[in-house]
Image (cartoon, rainbow, N blue to C red):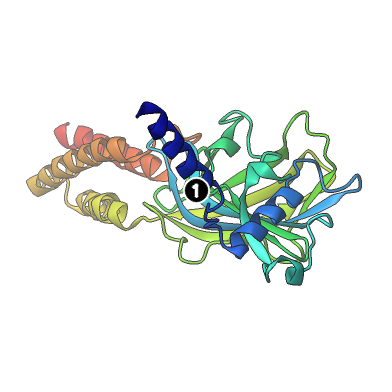
Amino acid sequence: MFLVTLIFIALINYVNSDCIIDERTPNKIYMGKLFDLLNSTDAPCKDATVVALKFSVRNFYFDKSETLFNTFIWIIFSWEDPRFKWNPDNYDGIDSFLVPFFFIWSPLPILHHMREFNEMEFLNYESRYCKIQNTGRIMCATKGIYTTNCHSQLKNWPYDIQTCALKFHIRDGIKDNVTFTFNSTRGLYALGAEYGSGWNIIDFSAVENATGEVKISLRFVVERQALGVVISVVMPSITVAVLTLTSLILDIKDRDRLYLAIFSLIINVSLLSVMGELIPHQGHDTPSILYYINDSIVCLDLLLRVQCE
């Protein structure tokens, strides 16, 4: 009985071995052939490879100390690789497909911004796929947060304007001959992202330099949204200034002059306390409005001394 069972199982396996169903569609078969054909991590050629770049800003913000400027950017790389060409008629009409960027040569690991933040930032890209077309055109899109030092200049606070720049370099040790360019386009776009948390982008530009250390530089000019500070600091400061001038023209013997001066002094001290919370502490200069309030306090101090005498 045991021998019969073994023979029966062997016959079933023999019959099934000739009846294996290939569930792969013709399209998937040709995709596999193309993928094997185009798989290459070597540079496209010994001559210079020209990579066209486009930067699209989606969001931006300063850190709490207003010393680090952060931008969330999409970067689109595109270039020509003559090895990646095929006739779609020979591959079931396939004229393009997606591959992970690490399966082919790509410029993603080559270009990076300021070294002090993240030397391996290209590993953190959320989008890691490239589109290959049968003409040899390759396009990769990545997105990430890029950070740069941008210390606030506070002389005109709260109407201050800051200029911040992202600088992209070629990674150390990279020997591939690559030129990055905007391909006669603007290169940097920020449509819909000009308004951030507490700041507005009022101007931006991109510069390419194929021969210098900095290959790509993105420049942002941002303006502080001052409405809240104007209501809480600037307008009260103007009001107190009017009260101080009024107290100066009143009769020295008028007791209302003394009360008005004391009230103005208390308001000025309160404004200094409020501004101590609002003004960034890492700025390189002193806001002019502080000198304005300081002069007002000195004036009130002299007025009170004269009044008391």
Which quarter of the figure has residue 169? top right
Which quarter of the figure has residue 239? bottom left
For the question of whether residue 167 can be seen, the reply is no
Foreground: 269 or 228?
228
In the image: residue 85, left or right of residue 22: right
In the image: residue 171, left or right of residue 295: right
Q: Residue at x 18, y 52 (%)?
A: 250
Q: Residue 31's x, y, as percent?
A: 65, 58
Q: Residue at x 52, y 61 (%)?
A: 202
Quadrant in which the C terminus is drawn = top left
Q: Residue 280's x, y, as percent?
A: 39, 37
Q: Is residue 174 above or below residue 234?
A: above
Q: Residue at x 42, y 60 (%)?
A: 195
Foreground: 145 or 18?
18
Q: Residue 264's x, y, as percent?
A: 19, 44
Q: Is residue 79 above or below residue 307?
A: below
Q: Residue 294's x, y, as percent?
A: 34, 38
Q: Is residue 168 above or below residue 26?
A: above
Residue occupied by mark 1 = 16
Q: Residue at x 47, y 61 (%)?
A: 194
Quadrant in which the N terminus is drawn = top left
Q: Dot 1: what SS?
A: helix
In the image: residue 3, left or right of residue 23: left
Crowdedness near tag 1: few (<14), some (14–19) or many (≥20) residues, C-alpha within 10 Å = few
Q: Is residue 104 above or below residue 10?
A: below
Q: What is the count of numbered marks?
A: 1
Q: Inspect the image, locate mark 1, and give the three-letter code of the amino acid beneath it.
A: Asn
